[in-house]
Amino acid sequence: MQSIEYVTSRSLFQEQPIELAYLLDRPLRQPIKGVIAVIPRGAGAINLQRVNGKVVHEANAILFVTQADYFKRHGYAIAVLDKPADQPSLSVDFRRSLEHRQDMAAMLADLHRRFATTPIWLAGSDSAAVSVMHAARDLRQEINGAMLLGGDFDNLRSFDFSHVTSPVLLVHHQDDTCNYASFYEAVQIANTYRFDMARINGGQPASRHQACANDGLHAFNGRQRNVAETIVNWLEGRKPTDDTSTDPALFGVMNEHVVQVPAEHRPDHASIETTVFRPDGLGPFPLIVLNHGKPADIETMMREQKRWRPMAQITALVERGFAVAVPMRRGFGRSGGKVPPASCDIDTASLIDARDIHQVVSYFQSQSYVDRQRVVLMGQSAGGLASLAYASQAYTGVRAVINFSGGLRLHGGLAPCWPQSLYSAISRFGHEAHTPSLWFYSENDRLFPPDVAQSMYQQYRRAGGNAQFVALPPSSSDGHQFFVHDHNVPLWLPQVEHFLVDAGVLQPNISMLARNTLAVEATRP
């Protein structure tokens, strides 16, 4: 039976307390064994209301709601907390906040009042994993355990799981390709903190460009009942039958794993955190080193320690036979060292980044599954510029550079020296270039509009650099993010394939040569 229940939150901390609503769905004809309290993912709104005496909501994409009949038959009630009225949506920052924990505590207190000594478990999927883990740490007396389904571990990288003492179950699809929900990371967390873990296989995938949607493997599409059965078994003391926690070597999608690339001849001894993807088999595979940009909010990126995992792009490259290494340069993710301070000396800053890339390239050239003579650098924004800086050095094995929206924009007090400082760096890299490069810039790039992009390209060519320029159509609201938008992969991938054939990295095949290169305008030297 579904009902809407109301509780008051934050009454001790502000003049106007918040009234919260939650959906309660409980068994009618049998004793209640326990309650599963669910925090919604995403914006967090289920828009609870009563229409003509009937409970209406938008929670039907939540697995615990779609499988409520199964849970109720086994004696479990389901409670789903709606978004508080004072929040437009449940941002990650709010999910980490004291106010949010007070809201969850208010619902839990009401559930304890209704169901006395009945155990209560907290559960969430996707971004709600942030809510659940912070509550499991701080509200440990109020819950009997926690469950994360397809958890957003990207936004939990700075969270200390060792402070969670309640039982925890992680449920994750082994083929989940959502950018922020790494199966590999789930396994590592389960291993490190002795959490229970259930690996889910099979089901119906969504399109590659909707990997995080509610109708794909990230949401266990086609396997929801299997997940419900796994959860009930765990609640009743039966461990998952396909438990990965005893296999610390288990890799994720496309053999994903993370290595800390050791420092070589560096005074700061800073290792570089690098995510690796590769095809099945022993190789050797050609290697692409994929280099991230530098967001405007660098401090937040450093604090949250996120890995960069553009999965649609990586999947396309691995499907074409590449191993892909994605390093987090110094100061980012869990790499050592510090991010170099911004300055007008863009060429020196980019060469520092290039040394980090060289540390990674050298390491992987020593791995048996990598073809050390077929290495490609690919980078977006500052990562593209760092790749061009690398190509200006006399390193061996790198056959090509692919630059997406490459450059470095200076702001504030450094603005007067830009773009001249950027052009100076580009000229130097072109003069000393040892490697052919392919450049992609969108018509509506807000950081490097067409006049700036063309000036960089012309100066690079005049200085002696071997480069091809591809002018891309506008992309969404800011073409600077062209590469990271999944739906753009078909626009750049054919150009990259042909370029790498010309560079001797890929062997041509009939299907590749026949593939339409789509409506992009290319300017070749």
Image: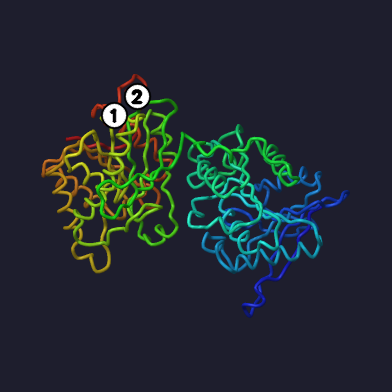
Q: From this view, report whether residue 279 is shown above or below residue 337.
A: above
Image location of residue 75, percent across then percent down: 81, 48
Residue depicted at x 19% and y 37%: 435
Which three-letter amino acid code belongs to the residue tagged 2?
Met
Characterize the local packing of mark 1: few (<14), some (14-19) or many (20 or more) Cα atoms within 10 angstroms. Answer: some
Give me the C-alpha separation between circle 1 and circle 2. 8 Å
- Mark 1 highlights which residue? 498
- Above/below status of 475 relative to 200: below
Quadrant in the picture for residue 432:
top left
The reply to whether dot 1 and dot 2 touch (C-beta < 8 Å) is yes
Name the amino acid type tagged 1. Answer: His
Q: Residue furthest top?
A: 510
Please give the label number shown on residue 49. none
Dividing the picture into quadrants, the one containing residue 42 is bottom right
Q: Position of residue 146 (x, y in %)?
A: 65, 53
> In the rendered image of this protein, does residue 502 appear above or below residue 414?
above
Q: Quadrant of the C terminus?
A: top left
In the drawing, does residue 183 fall left or right of residue 476?
right
Question: Residue 207 location, x and y as percent?
Answer: 52, 36
Report the residue at 50% width, 39% height from top.
177
Tag of residue 512: 2
Element at label 2: helix
- Give whichever of 230, 188 is nearer the camera: 188
Residue 258 rendering spot, x and y as whole percentages: 43, 42
Q: Is residue 335 above or below residue 258?
A: below
Going 29% across and 29% down the picture, which residue do you hit?
498
Q: Secondary structure at mark 1?
A: helix
Q: Is 517 left, or right, of 454 in this rendering?
A: right
Q: Which residue is outermost to the right? A: 29
